[in-house]
Image: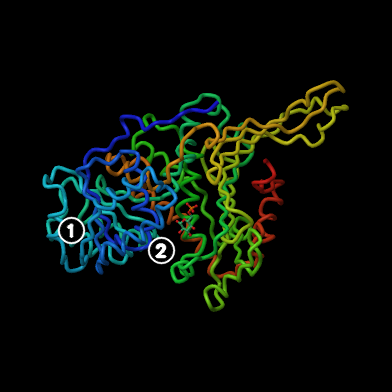
Amino acid sequence: MVIESKIPKEAEIPPTDFVIVGGTGDLALRKIFPALFHRFLDGQIPESCALIAAARNAIPKTEFLAQLRRFCEEVITQDNEADWDVFADRIQIIAFNVRTGEGASDIEEACVETRAVPRVFYFAISPALFADACQTLERTGLKTDQTRLVVEKPMGHDLKSAEALDDSILEVFEERQIYRIDHYLGKETVQNLMALRFANSIFESLWSNAHIDHVQISVAEEVGVESRESYYDEFGALRDMVQNHLLQLLCLVAMEPPSKFVADQVRDEKLRVLRALSPITHDNFDSNVKLGQYEKGSVQATHVPSYTDEVGRPTGTETFAALRCEISNWRWSGVPFYLRTGKRLASRASEIVVTFKRPPHNIFQNGARGSEVMEPNRLVIRLQPDEGLKLCMTSKEPGPGGMRLFPASLNLSFNETFKTRLPEAYERLLMDVARGNQTLFMRSDEVEAAWAFIDPIVNEAKKRKPEKYTAGSWGPVSSFELMAVHGHRWIEPEVHG
Ligand code: BG6
């Protein structure tokens, strides 16, 4: 069945001014403005919204648009070329110094006159500038009661620095005004995970240690460090990916149902999961954490250099991390959650695989072909690419010839089922900011609880050397052992195809 999808009425946003601070930088060009363009094409952005790129060194608008167009090109067609012109025309480039406040009056002038219209300030700048930028917004009067602030990771590099960063933001803004982005929460299938769990009854009764054997969450990337060596070499996979994206995914799988789908209730439940994670410390680190670093190899038939060649010096930073986590509560006690993420792996694939317990007794052991290799039921939630859900089951092969069992699956591919382009995470998140909906954004206590779990792991990791793995593989050998000793194995994306 193919379902035609249209933007529902309630998705329209109220008039809102968007001020992207650092608006001519990489994040703004690659993600933020293209996201706004997509929403503009769908008619979601009212005409009265100001779209402002505020930057210390404002480049000429023609240059900015030429750069931006490259990231929007794939959706510009002969039919909508005029829309691009209208969108481009609406963007204003304003020189703004976040330290001195120079240029603030130009921003004020460019914003919609009434101060009742929400103003979104999106900090696409280094977190080192956040404190000054907040103070500047206050001092210059740009901050109104209706101002919303969007900030991106890295939100600190450990618990202490995250607290300090938060304190500096909270000096100026109230929590209700702060939108901390974890773009994984804006991904379609991640939201669908909540629909799957909380809009259906069949899974909830199975969703615990009574029926689930283990959960694995993989976020595999083909890319290397790209042009971010200095950031990445300081952060590594644990702080770049696990502290935020993977722990957020874990929370969504493991959280209790909130009584309402509203921001603070959802965030309260996620926080409870983070606080229930069993600590990984010196004593249990080696049996629960495996780290790797890629050597040269071939990813999708392209030769790529080693990590150390990419950063230009020997370094002990991990580009791969696999963890075995436990959640100490009634629902999940005894169910391992395996997390793994890495760069330069065999393919780009992010998946959550929930493996159910095997049937308590195999009645097919006498003669049914295939019964000896009966796989447990698995629910595969595919985040990217090819978003979808798959329920793996054992079925009878049709036709005569006795009972023959084979692995079958119920498949819901979003691309095939819904005749529509799936929006990028930033599109959804930006519209949520405009609507004042914080459900898919992190609260400060969540960020801090995640650091409290990760800090001791990072401290132990620093004392060890990551194991080498060949670029284009699925990571270091030890990551397979992490599961094998418990009778489990990673389910690679191809295997359940
Ligand atoms: C970012 C990390 O948060 O997420 C990057 O800093 C990573 O290192 C990226 O490549 C992955 O995001 P996505 O949406 O491409 O899976």
- Residue 376 in the image: state x and y as whole percent: 70, 35
> Does 334 sit left or right of 402 as displayed?
left
What is the CA distance from the residue labelled 1 to the residue labelled 2? 25 Å
Tag in front: 1 or 2: 1
Q: Secondary structure at mark 2?
A: loop
Residue 218 screen position, x and y as percent: 58, 49
Residue 232 seen by the camera: yes
Residue 312 horizontal side relative to residue 426, left or right: right
Q: Is residue 109 above or below residue 372?
A: below
Q: Residue at x 54, y 41 (%)?
A: 387
**Which residue is at the front of the view, 423 or 101?**
423
Q: Earlier in the sequence, mark 1 or mark 2?
A: 1
Residue 164 showing in the rendered view? no
Q: Determine which quarter of the picture holds residue 231.
A: bottom left
The colour scheme used here is: rainbow
State the image quarter where residue 160 is shown. Answer: bottom left
Image quarter of the C terminus? top right
Amino acid beneath label 1: Leu
| Outermost residue to the bottom | 313
**Neighbours of disc 1 within 10 Å: few (<14), some (14-19), many (20+):** some
Tell me the residue at 61%/64% (across/down). Answer: 292
Residue in the image at 18% along x and 58% along y: 137
The amino acid beneath tag 2 is: His
Where is residue 153 drawn, in percent x and y? 38, 57
Q: Secondary structure at mark 1?
A: helix
Residue at numbered disc 2: 157
Q: Nearer the viewer, residue 24 or 185?
A: 24
Look at mark 1 in the image and give the residue it sits on: 137
Expressed as whole percent of the image width and height from the top left, the position of residue 191 reads 45, 38
Residue labelled 2 has its Cβ within 8 Å of some atom of ligand 1: no
